[in-house]
Every structure is written in C-alpha cells, then in structure tokens.
Amino acid sequence: MRNKLSLVLFCFSLTLLAQNENSDYKKKVLESSEMEFLSSYYTQDGTHSVIGGGIGTEKLNDETASIILSTPLGDDAVLTMDVGISAYSSASSSNTNPFSSTGASQGGGEEEDDDDDRGDEGHGGKATPPTGTPWQASSGASKTDELIYINGSYSHSSKSRNFIWNAHAAVSNEYDYTSLGLGAGISKLFNKKNTEISLSASAYLDTWRPIYPTELHEFESYGSNFLNQGFFSGVTVLDQSGNASGAYLPTQFSSYQQVNRNSYALTLGFSQIVLKKLQIALSADILTQNGLLSTPYHRIYFADKPQYFIGNASSIANYASPQNKDVFRLADDVERLPNTRFKIPVGVRLNYYMNASFTLRTFYRYYSDDWGITSQTVNFELPVKLNRSFTIAPMYRFYTQTQATYFAPYNQHVSTEIYYTSDYDLSAFHSSQIGGSISYTDLFTTFKIGSFGLKNIDLRYNRYTRSDLLTANIVSFSVKFVGN
Amino acid sequence: MLILFLYFLWLTLILKKKISFFQVKQQVRSRTKVYFLSLSRFNYLSLYPSITQIKNRPMKKIVLGSILVLSSLQSCAVVEEYEKVYVNDPDMVLTARSSERFENAFQVYREAAVGGNGGKTGGGCGCN
C-alpha cells in the first residue's frame, strides 16, 4: 500500500513539474503598499462560567484593534506586518479571586492586583467578612487583560507566478500566556492557474504562567495548615449546612508540573476553478498539541466531596441560582485534561457567481479529535451588489459539536476520575450565528490620506446564540488604503 | 460538479464511520502492547491482518477517491485568463475576509473545532 501510494504521489509530483510556465506576462505581485485598519467589539453573556466550575456569569467584553501593512519587495515578493492589541474585561476570569476583600494571592506575588484596598494580611479583625458569588464579577486583577500580538510574513512568487513560497513568524503575549509561532508553506499553480495545491506547516510554542484559584493557591503556598494563614487567616469557612468548619482540605490539588503548550499544524490546500462562475477550495489540517492543555484557573467541584463555602450561610441553598449574591464555593481542584490532543479538520469552500448582483459563498467543515469531539460547521453568505460601490451580505452559520469525553457539568465529576473539566466549550451544543455586512468600495481611491487612497470599508455585525444559552454579539470594522 | 458533490458527501460519510483514525491508533497500540507482553511473534502475525484491514480501509478509500476526483477535475474545461472576470470578483475569493478574523477568533475560543479554513490553527490560550 505504501509503495503504491509513493508511486502515485511521485507521478503526481511529475505532472506538477511538467506544467508549462508562462513567463510572457509579468506583473508585480502587489502593485503598491496596502494598509488596513481593523477593529472589533465583542460582548458575551451566559450562565456556565468555567471559572465557577460550570456555573456563573460568562460576561465578557473584548475590544480589538489591529493594523496590517503589506509592502511589495521588488516585483515578486510581499512583506506583511500585522500588529494588534486586544483588551478584555471578563467577569468570568475575574473570579479566579472572587472574594470581596483580602486575598492572599493578591499580595503573594502570584497575581498582580489593581485594587489598592487589598493587601496580603489576614482577614482577622476586619469588620466585613469576605463574600463572593459566581454570578457577579469581582474586581480582581484578572478582570482585565491585554493581548498584544505581532505577526510578520513574507511571500515570494516565481517569475511565472506559478510557484509561491512563504514564511511567517508570530509573537503574542498576555499576562499569563506567551506564544511564539513559526511557519512556512509552498503553493503551486498549474492548469493555466485553474488549479492550486498548497502545503504549509506551522508550530506554536506557548508558555503558561499559571494562576490558580485563590483558595487552591493558598493551599499550595501554606500546606495543610493553610486555613490559619494568608488569605484564610480569620476567615470563616462554612460547610454545606452553613456551620463554621475547619475541614476544607483540597488534597486533590497540586500545581501543574508542565507549563508549555506546543501546537503543530500541517495544512494541505487544494483549489480549483470548476467553471467560469464556480470555484472550490478544500483544506485539510493535521493538528497536534502537547503540553499543558488545561487552563489553570478552571475550577472543578466533585460530587463525592463535602462542600465548603465563604460568604453568607443563608445563600448556600441558592448557590447555583443567579439569586446568589454573596456566597462562593471553594474548589476541590482545577481541570485536568490529557497533555496531548490530535485534531483533523477538513473544510470545503464553494463560491458561485450567480449574476452581476448575487454571489453565493458557502463553507462546510467536518472536525474530529481524539478527545471525543466531532463537529460540523456550515456557513452561507450571499453578497448582493447594490451598485458599483456598495455591497451588502447577509450571512448565516450553523455549528454543532459532540461532547468531549472528559466533560461533565457542575458538581458531577467524581474525584476518582483522571481527567475532568466543566468547560462548556467542550460540551455538546449547537450554535447559530446570523448577521450581515455592508461594504463600500472606492474604485478610484478618490478619498486620500497622505499618499494612501481609500480602497474599501467593511462593517459587519453578527449575533451568536448557543444552545446552552450563551449569547454573543460582535461588530467588526475594517478600512483599507492603497498607496499611490 | 456532480462528481465533486458526490465526493464530498462520500468523504463526510467515511469520516463519520465508527472506525475513526483514533480508534485504529488505539487498537494498533493495544495490540502491539499485547505482542510485546507476550513476546511472541506468532501472536503478532495472527493479529496483523485484522489490524491492516482496519487501518487501511478508510485511508485507502480516501486516497483512491481523492486521486480519482483530482484527476476528474483536471479534465474540467480550462477557464482562460480572459474568462476569469467572474472568479476574480472580490466576493469570490476562496479565503475568509480579513474583517472575519475577529469572528473566527471568538469561534475558536467558544467552540472546540479549529482549522479546515486555511486560517490560524494554533497559538494563544483561548481561555477567556
């Protein structure tokens, strides 16, 4: 089988090399520099916060801005720089430390704190005991963060424009995570540029700086006597009946030994002009990840362990209800997921030019991984040209996935399991996204800023609803200029 | 077009079959483990045909089918450069638009699936 496959691939590669290269006509790959400004505003809310072990608010706002600058290098090459910043405020992740007053992890050097009224002294003697709830944001340090990224890529085309190679590098950083990426790829066009085959590979070498939930961080710092030290000094821990207890001991927890996460991708692409008005693209990836694939501040609550709380004893009965405003359950552990993952997505795009006004853009993807998830995605977009300058495009996307083997909702895992998570992003659900865009194209680049003329403006809005009641809205805006 | 449609329909069915690549991988691993534990070449040989059958069936179909379809596409009528006015329309581009990148980013965060669209396939924790 292997020999036959090798023979077929060898013959196929010969046909690629045998294509005639048409070098009569030569045009710059990119005629002039292009500059694109992009920004977005994203907001979401839901009731299955992973920081709360599967319950709590998922409120999150994210604002992003980026600039993409593409410059021709000679006739055959293009250098592209992409720089961006994403600033988010998250009610969910702020609840790494959900408590309203002293948290030892704030002053303990593990987590920066932007609240001046917090310290690392014990709570003893303070008038107001700490409270918290998974249903509201705390004002903890992790409430806000910024992701900064820089991507650079270089692509070079052969004189005939039938062969392209490219390389890219990427760096991104946020408070507890750094990512370094490298990649390269080749593309070959043949059959009078009706057919293109591409192959690319990339590697992302990421590093966590783990932040653990406050109660687990204290346990790790002070050991079995942690209830009398640091954050817990003077703080009353309640049992499920609301009585003071000194029995809370999350022995299942230990900090992760591994902090690296490596992702490798091999992508095979194929595109074909099928008819004058129809073209299709197929993209298949082989993705593998290893290292720390869990998120350090995702709480887990075990069904077979006693429950302990901090806050108002009378609210314990309503803990899982949004009515709970002042009690927070202490974690038994953080999520534990395998340190390898293997994914295979296969995607197909099919675009059809219906007439001068309508174009149909479609996308389908099948995805499978070895965590037990399979998913399917279907996307339709129907750009409608209103005139030479304006296009509107309604769009709809449907997504469905099966549940990961390691997922269970709040308080349904048991402590004898090896792997566990209550992250609803890994649960079984389906989602719908509906929206549209409006684009303006300035054919003659009449509006100018300096030596750059406006090429197009694009405004998009989409509303996303998930079957587990998560909802999200996103507005994106882009404006592109070309150099004269 | 019909061939293409049937191909992708068939590819989806193949991928949805109960015997996935991962199950094959696990089966090969577990059986290889048996072999090493028993230290018997006989056991391995007796297992080998069944492993080969399971391992090769879906892959063989996919590889042969892909070659067949790629060959059939070669025989599509070639669209000349001067006839590409429709496929060169900006709305016909076969990649996601740059303004879609933020939607793709949040979808990667909120859903398990990634890739298959020629876009970013790694990097970043996606944890918020």
Image (spheres, coloured by chain):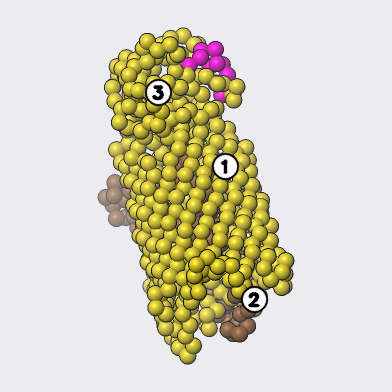
- Residue tagged 2: B86
Q: Are marks 3 and 2 on the same chain?
A: no
Assess disc 2: are there few (<14), some (14-19) or many (≥20) residues with their C-alpha within 10 Å of its C-alpha. many
State the SS at label 3: loop
State the SS at label 1: strand
**Does residue A18 appear in the picture of this structure?**
yes
Task: Where is residue A297? Give x, y as percent.
Answer: 41, 34
Task: Where is residue A408? Give x, y as percent.
Answer: 51, 34
According to the colouring, which chain is brown?
A: B
- Rounded to the nearest angstrom, the CA distance separating label 1 from label 3 is 29 Å
According to the colouring, which chain is yellow?
A: A
Q: Nearer the viewer, residue B35 or A231?
A: A231
Could you tell me the amino acid type at mark 1?
Answer: Thr
Queried whether the magenta region covers residue A131, the answer comes back as: no
* CB atoms of marks 2 and 1 within 8 Å: no
- Residue tagged 1: A43
Residue drawn at x 62%, y 55% as measured from the top left? A460
Quarter of the picture holding the N terminus of chain A: bottom left
Assess disc 3: are there few (<14), some (14-19) or many (≥20) residues with their C-alpha within 10 Å of its C-alpha. few
Residue drawn at x 65%, y 57% as measured from the top left? A437
- Residue tagged 3: A117
Q: Nearer the viewer, mark 3 or mark 2?
A: 3
- Rounded to the nearest angstrom, the CA distance separating label 2 from label 1 is 37 Å
Give the dominant element type of the magenta stretch: helix, strand or loop.
helix
